[in-house]
Image (cartoon, grey):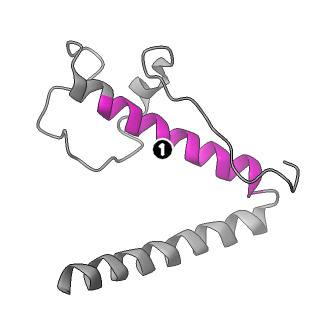
């Protein structure tokens, strides 16, 4: 990716990309629709498509990390460590904001 590219827009449409159906056990979402019938055999509903979009977003984030940040195995390890560190930071920040 050229240095001048600052962002990329990726359209996410679970109705045209059925790959989300096989990813539901691999990619964890926020669980908002955990009690809803959102499996690929479920009837069409806003909840089903919302869960499908969240699953596809997870897939595309992992693909972007692999293609643009994991140029070597060492970089992949560092990216993984940085994501874990960032997650701890954001969790601590979220807790601090909730306490104020």
Q: Residue at x 66, y 52 (%)?
A: 65
What is the magenta segment's predominant secondary structure? helix
Residue 58 is situated, as x and y percent measured from the top left of the image, at: 48, 44
- Is residue 83 found left or right of 54 in the rendered image? right
Q: Which residue is tagged 1?
A: 58
Q: Compared to 93, does 19 lie above or below? A: above
Q: Looking at the rendering, in which quadrant would you find the C terminus?
A: bottom left
Q: Is residue 29 above or below residue 86?
A: above
Question: Where residue 87 sits in the image (x, y, percent)?
Answer: 44, 72
Q: How many numbered marks appear?
A: 1
The residue drawn where x is 31% and y is 32% is 50
Residue drawn 20% across and 45% down? Answer: 32
Q: Is residue 82 left or right of residue 41?
A: right
Residue nearest the observer in this picture, 26 or 32: 32
Query: Is disc 1 surrounded by few (<14), some (14 to 19) or many (20+) residues within 10 Å?
Result: some
In the picture shown, does residue 95 fall above or below 78?
A: below
Q: Nearer the viewer, residue 50 or 42?
A: 50
Quadrant of res 41:
top left
Q: Which picture quadrant has residue 72? A: bottom right
Asked if residue 68 is among those painted magenta in the image, a careful observer would answer: yes
Q: Position of residue 55 (x, y in %)?
A: 41, 37
In the image, taking residue 72 as reference, residue 17 lies left or right, namely left
Classify mark 1: helix, strand or loop: helix
Residue shown at the point (60%, 74%) measured from the top left: 82
Task: Specify the quadrant of the image occupied by residue 8.
Answer: top right
Point out residue 59 in the picture as x, y percentages from the top left corner. 52, 40
Residue bounds of the magenta highlight: 50-70
């Amino acid at each position: 990716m050229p240095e001048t590219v600052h962002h990329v827009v990726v359209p996410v449409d679970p109705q045209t990309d059925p790959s989300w159906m096989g990813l539901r056990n691999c990619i964890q979402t926020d669980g908002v629709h955990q009690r809803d019938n959102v499996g690929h055999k479920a009837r069409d509903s806003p909840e089903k498509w919302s869960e499908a979009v969240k699953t596809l977003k997870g897939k595309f984030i992992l693909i972007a990390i692999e293609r643009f940040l994991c140029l070597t195995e060492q970089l992949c390890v560092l990216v993984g460590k940085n994501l874990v560190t960032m997650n701890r930071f954001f969790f601590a920040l979220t807790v601090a904001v909730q306490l104020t």
